[in-house]
Amino acid sequence: MPISMSVKTLDYTPAYPPYPSLWMAGYGGAPRGNQGLVDRRLRAQCIVIDDGAGPKVMLRVDVVSIPRYVHQAIRSGVTPMVDDHDGNFLIICSHTHSGPFIGTTRPNPYVMMSLTPADVSAIEDTTNVFIAQMIELVEQTLAMARTQVTLWYKEGNASIGYNRAGEPNDLSTVNALIARRTSDNGLHTVLFGYACHAVARGNDRYFCSDFPGAATDVISNALGVQALFFQGAAGDQEPNDPHGPGQVTNLGTILGNEVVAMVNSGGWTAVTGPISTYYEELSLPLTVDLGDPAAVIRARNSYSDRLDNLPPSDFAYRHAEVMLEEIAGVGLPRVFPMPIQRWKMGGLNIFAMSHEVLSEYAVKLRNQTPGKLWVMAYANETEGYVAANGILQDGGAVRWGYEAGWVDNPDISGEATWTTFYPWPAPLKFSPSGPAAPGTTERVVLDASTAMLNL
């Protein structure tokens, strides 16, 4: 079945105006705002792939995260353009920590940086500008003339990071999907992926697309086409030290050169239509059943104790304020929503998982799935970490419990862990010992993912 494609890149690097806020996301602590300093420009890129049965759209953007309500706003604006089929639209974040703060819920700018209500309101205004820009970019790309192409997939290898949680998985696979014009077999577009936190630059006030942007520049400059980066299961993958502006270039050059070498050599697998798409939203359980009034009372008491024992300057103090406000108002969340998505093609499966998924999920899915599988993460929305059972069991014993979400009490969010910054009332459910049992986070994710991959 013939496949056609259109691609468009938008430099959306925020500036005032039209962006009301230039607050930055990715690191907690003191308020961190951009004042016009830009190292590598921030891109939003859209690719439309039409297999003859209607367009399928990928939107990738250099931003640390997209909260659920922002994802839903963008999706509601886009899905009418793609036959109202949720599976036909996919968003991926690069997870650069040197971009704007988008959304005011998860992460929470008050908890992370103690911002004032006026500052938070400005972030919300910026978020509205961002949403409109993303929808307009998709609309413009859909309206472009499409080029008939053939698709080809290949995997390479590059080592630019390590597993910061001490797990055995150091993901080094480089994924690449290229499009060649059917008219002359010339290269049209390069899609590439890798799994590593985009924090090579470190914490400063420059807007920067980090190593994914540097790699994109290497590929585009060498091959003369648009290149699009897609993040993988990088929740526990950290770029090599030292972090700094020079490391952005170093690691991006290694990754970009590997993709260029892959394109300039053989061994590609043909990828064909039709493209079947699937989308599902999972409900991950928390360690505490917050539908139980007694559990809510215990949570309220625990968070009240934190207000009594911590200074207002502490992350966990502000998190406790937010939790108590929710108990008194809309109520605490009872589950952790997790969209998953699959694009099934001849010769390749693309499987996209929302949130900061840890590497073990990618390894297990790749090992049990026949054929070529490209696992993406930070897809559609990012509202926390999704660790496998072992990390969840370890709690504060591994990296102060950051990826697990708890320290010494699994029934409450750990101070200075992801469940505080995002913020959630409790970590994700796990088996206290042994392998993951049915109904725990790992089993819910793997069972649903396997079922989707077997469709």
Image: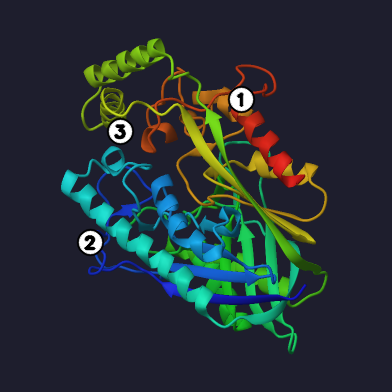
Residue 313 can be seen, yes or no: yes
Residue in front for this viewpoint, 280 or 314: 280
Please, what is the three-letter code of the amino acid marked with disc 2?
A: Pro
Measured Cα–Cα span from mark 3 to mark 2:
26 Å
Give the foreground label among 3 and 2. 2
Say above or below: 72 vs 213. Answer: above
What element does badge 2 sit on? loop
Please, what is the three-letter code of the amino acid marked with disc 1?
A: Thr
Q: Of the residues under marks 1 and 3, which one precedes in the sequence?
A: 3
Return the x and y of residue 315 as percentages of the image width and height: 30, 33
Say above or below: 4 vs 286. Answer: below
Q: Which mark is residue 315?
A: 3
Please, what is the three-letter code of the amino acid marked with disc 3?
A: Phe
Residue at left offset 51%, top offset 59%: 79
Mark 2 residue crowding within 10 angstroms, few (<14) / some (14–19) / many (20+)? some
Measured Cα–Cα span from mark 1 to mark 2:
42 Å
The answer to whether the residues at label 3 and label 2 have Cβ atoms under 8 Å apart is no
Say above or below: 217 vs 316. Answer: below
Q: Of the residues under marks 1 and 2, which one precedes in the sequence?
A: 2
Q: Which mark is residue 20?
A: 2
Return the x and y of residue 452 as percentages of the image width and height: 70, 44
Return the x and y of residue 451 as percentages of the image width and height: 73, 40
Residue 157 can be seen, yes or no: no
Q: Quadrant of the N terminus?
A: bottom right
Q: Of the residues under marks 3 and 2, which one precedes in the sequence?
A: 2
Residue at left offset 31%, top offset 46%: 104
What element does badge 1 sit on? loop
